[in-house]
Image (cartoon, grey):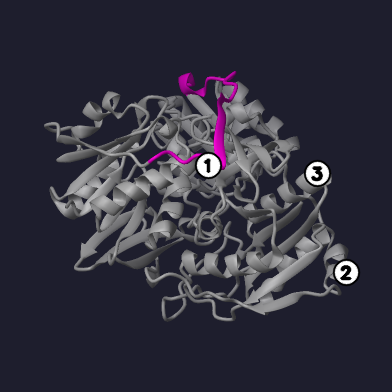
Amino acid sequence: MRVLVCLKRVPELAEAELRPAADGLSVDGQGLVWELNEWDAFALEWALRLIEQAGGELSVVSLGGEEDEEVLFRALAMGAGQAVRLHRAERTWLDPAALAAALAELAGRIGPDLILTGVQSADLGQAQVGVRLASILGWPYATAVIGLEEVREGGLTVRRELEGGLEERLEIDLPAVLTIQSNPNPPRYVSVLGIRKAKTRPLEIRPAQTAGPAGLSRLAGFRPVVKERAVSWLDQDTDEAARQLADLIRERG
Amino acid sequence: MARALVIVEHCQGRLAEINAQVFALARRLCGRDYAGLLLAGRPDELAPEAAVYCPRLYTLASPALEPYNAAAWLPALESALARLEPDLILLGQTAFGLDLAPALAQRLGAPLATDVTAADLDGQVLQVSRPVFGGKLAADLVLPLEPWAALTLRPGLIEPLQPGPAGEVSPLEPPPPPEHLARRVAGLIRAAAGVDLTRARIIVAVGRGIDGPENIGLARDLAGRLGAELACSRPVADLGWLDKERQVGVSGQTVKPKIYLALGISGAFQHQMGMSGSETIIAVNRDPEAPIFDIAHFGLVGDLFEVVPSLIEVLEE
């Protein structure tokens, strides 16, 4: 089975200070640490396990500039056989339909049986690209997939997460697109040495064909969120804070 | 023809809670110039309950539409929308909305804004705001309404529309069902619910900040002393540090204890949805910008590994 996983490099968000750039149309990169989008890492792991079970080969793709290649090298170190960067140097707004169009063009060249994306990206969190990609290709898709139940002739049976502890078992014909939700199979560890070795492997760079349909969203701007917080801060001294906590719990518990 | 159309969500014979909120947004944007669209195996059973939210409810019946399956819904929706031609299509930001909306938008050649927190119509454009970068920034987007645009609304932000007089119900002719569905629902699975967190008076919940399974004992110790239930956010359950049945949030349990003590939980919106109704929320986190502090009543920016042992000591006194 030939599997293509779509990857995105995103800033780490926990404890990061995010600021819009001066023009408001991108974020100020100063001080940000970048990483592979967490859900894409889960998608990679999902693909690797599927291939271990059913055989096949793994290709990965990312759309961006040279700096985005680090997520491709990570994927090569994890076990991908082929990596493609769709070149787009600008970090400006790109409607998910345009991004999906570029990925569909590549999928047409690679001819995968299965395409995986993360369920969403940690930065913009639009959760659109995978499903739009499936629609362009005319393939079936499933979102928020958390498990593989069976590999059948010409199809898969997967588990998909709904809400409130409800899950769905789905049969899906191949070729298909799945968007992968975080699940109990965490992305495997790769060593720094492994990534360094992967950097000696060839990477294919192609122009991104982002011509999408007519109706596209436009970014008016990013802005800081005005938070109306009602939080009362406890004392910064640990022992005093612990006493305050104990009192609060006694009074209100 | 109505300007806005709400696609009605339902599961296992019940309307979803989000519908009344999506209808409220449609009404706010378009006055009375909106309608609902109900696709179901037997829409007659749900129509009376949905019609009280809209001046007109269109229904479309086909056995293939239940349970929800995108492969059956998309051709049916496309046929209905070709007739109804709304400017704006609205859904909830739910598992259903996120599965359906991007495919529908792509087929219609429409722009889509997901996870919308505020929306406004201005002439021939839709202006929306949505959180980005984990809620640390907001993005303002402009979507052309020509030919149409779509959005999914984040739950819990808009006051649900109060039921009114039932709107007129208009059945639509369903298209012939597809001969083969490339995606088929093989069954619904209810995850084992061995732990009922909804009855807990106090909940001690841990997030990724607990750092490793070896530290769960610390939280368990605290919970034991407080007579509290131990709970967790999604990453902790995914990593297997605690059982999935202790997960609080959209895909886990929804709780309303007297006290919710969140330790090392950043407070993603999906987690907040499961605990924001708690009477008193106390959060400990190293990141002062963590979204959990947006809804916490009491907060401490600090290291849980210092605070919790200290708290245990105080409780021992």
- Amino acid type, label 2: Lys
Residue at position x 14%, y 35% in the image: B168
Do tags 2 and 1 sit on the same chain? Answer: yes
Q: Is residue A70 left or right of residue B125?
A: right
Residue at position x 47%, y 65% in the image: A97
Q: Chain of mark 1?
A: A
Of discs 2 and 1, which sits in the foreground?
2
Q: Quick one: quadrant of the C terminus of chain B?
A: top right
In the image, is residue A66 above or below residue B153? below
Q: Residue B4: where, in percent of width, then height?
A: 23, 52
* Residue occupied by mark 2: A197
Measured Cα–Cα span from mark 3 to mark 1 = 54 Å
Q: Residue A186: where, in percent of width, then height?
A: 72, 45
Q: Is residue B126 left or right of residue A102?
A: left
* Residue occupied by mark 1: A241
Q: Is residue A226 left or right of residue A115?
A: left
Location of residue B114 by image quarter: bottom left
Measured Cα–Cα span from mark 2 to mark 1 = 48 Å
Q: Secondary structure at mark 3?
A: helix
Q: Residue B179: where, in percent of width, then height?
A: 50, 39
Q: How many marks?
A: 3
* Residue occupied by mark 3: A54
Measured Cα–Cα span from mark 2 to mark 3 = 27 Å
Of discs 3 and 1, which sits in the foreground?
3
Mark 2 and mark 3 lie on one chain; the one further toward the N terminus is 3
In the image, is residue B253 above or below residue A86? above
Q: Looking at this view, is B83 or A105 the one in front? A: B83
Task: Read off the magenta span.
Answer: B176-201
Instruction: Tell me if I can see residue B237 in this picture.
Output: yes
Residue at position x 83%, y 48% in the image: A55
